Image (tube, helix red, strand yellow):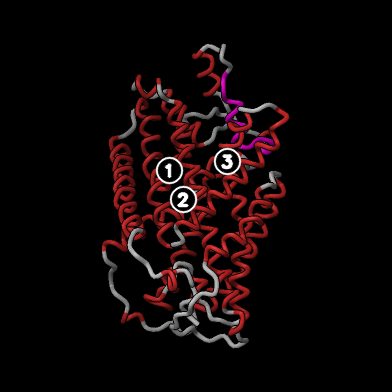
Amino acid sequence: MLETSLAGKECSSEPSSSAVGSKSSSASSHSLTPDKGQPAGEAAGLSLHKTFVNYGEAMMYSLETCPNPWLRAHSAWGRYIVSFLLIITQLGFCSVYFMFMADNLQQIAEEAHVTSRTCQPRKILVLRPILDIRFYMLIILPFLILLVFVQNLKVLSIFSTLASVTTLGSMALIFEYIVQGIPFPSDLPLMANWETFLLFFGTALFTFEGVGMVLPLKNQMKNPQQFSFVLYMGMSLVIILYIFLGTLGYMKFGADTQASITLNLPNCWLYQSVKLMYSVGIFFTYALQFHVPAEIIIPFAISQVSESWTLCVDLSVRTALVCLTCVSAILIPRLDLVISLVGSVSSSALALIIPPLLEITTFYSEDLSCATIAKDIMISILGFLGCIFGTYQALYDLIQPVNHSIANSTGVYA
């Protein structure tokens, strides 16, 4: 939908791969900023003739051409709102990655003395943690700070490849385990309670939300006209993978399913290595998710200082942002609830609320059909209701007292 809305803002010619490959989303943002002395009409003409824009710019240009004069006058706020939500979402992803890596690292380290070569299903057994989960987050922190200092996109693409390889290898071994000896699901409830549905809404949006990367991916394709096929094919494979993993995992472990299914794996060296591989994949993925908010915040911070301070400010902002995600994870070390909260608060706005409204404002003057308008309004209302109720349920569960000796151990199985 976002891609459809943007079509009305792009010129007919597609960008060449060389032109696109040399520009990041932040660079395109700066190139689209008119000079102070430039006439408004000329600036608007330039904005409509750019070969590509990012999500925030698509929102701004859409508001510039809408019939409402108040929205046209405040179109820049559209970009600010989208940029703010992207920052919140991506840093939320990074905080979740902190928790995921710490959970798995804790289980690997604290079960090392009882890890065997024989892979047997876990039995319920509450273990008192040797070290608090927050300690493992602090161990990971300096390594992630060094990782985000890497700014070369070619090097980041290597990290992305490593993350994909380790994640796919881990997925294969996880599937190999959960399909063995699945009990008959007659004892599982037919339907969850409404509170669980609200948390599921945020979790599902967190899982699928990647709208901030849609336009940058298209912009950097050699053949952007094939983007729709790539998008639909990729999302179809991801949906099938998630459905099978979620369904089989729940059938295998039932109510004992953990926030991360890796924590349900047997305590043997094979599956401990799976947790390690998955954590390595998430470690490198952190840099990719971090790249989005960094490209929004750092150019603005650098513009406020002289050239001699550029490098110092750049590294300082990167360090501060990583520490912010670590502090967030330390303050709320509840992986499942934080995932749902991030999905409900910001992902719902970016993926469900804004894109339908963007389509209406862009194409309303072009005789947009009533069916399309009704569809967009319904999607936005669904996203808004999910945002409100999903956020409420996640916050309500977060403030409930929890037994940290159990919740932070992540090793409630042995």
Give the residue type that dot 1 points to: Leu
- Queried whether the magenta region covers residue 29, the answer comes back as yes
Q: What whole-number distance in Å separates the C-alpha atoms at marks 3 and 1?
A: 15 Å
Q: Report the disc number at residue 52.
A: none
| Looking at the image, residue 238 lies above or below residue 151 | below
- Queried whether the magenta region covers residue 412, the answer comes back as no
Q: How many marks?
A: 3
Give the residue type that dot 3 points to: Pro
| Looking at the image, residue 38 lies above or below residue 329 | above
Residue at x 46% of width, y 50% of height: 209
Residue labelled with disc 2? 209
Q: Quadrant of the N terminus?
A: top left
- Among the two numbered marks 3 and 2 on one chain, the one whose residue lies closer to the N terminus: 2
Instruction: State the SS at label 2.
Output: loop
Q: What whole-number distance in Å separates the C-alpha atoms at marks 3 and 2?
A: 15 Å
The answer to whether residue 223 shows anywhere in this view is no
Residue labelled with disc 1? 350
Residue at x 49% of width, y 84% of height: 121
Could you say where residue 170 lies in the image, as x and y percent from the top left? 59, 70
Residue at x 43% of width, y 65% of height: 243
Could you say where residue 350 lies in the image, as x and y percent from the top left? 43, 43
- Among the two numbered marks 1 and 2 on one chain, the one whose residue lies closer to the N terminus: 2
- Among the two numbered marks 3 and 1 on one chain, the one whose residue lies closer to the N terminus: 3
Could you say where residue 65 lies in the image, as x and y percent from the top left? 42, 23
Residue labelled with disc 3? 216
Image side of residue 406 versus residue 43, left or right: left
**Which quadrant holds residue 70?**
top left
Q: Nearer the viewer, residue 211 or 111?
A: 111
> Few, some or many C-alpha atoms within 10 Å of disc 3 (few <14, some 14-19, many ≥20)?
some
Q: What span is colored magenta in the figure?
A: 21-34
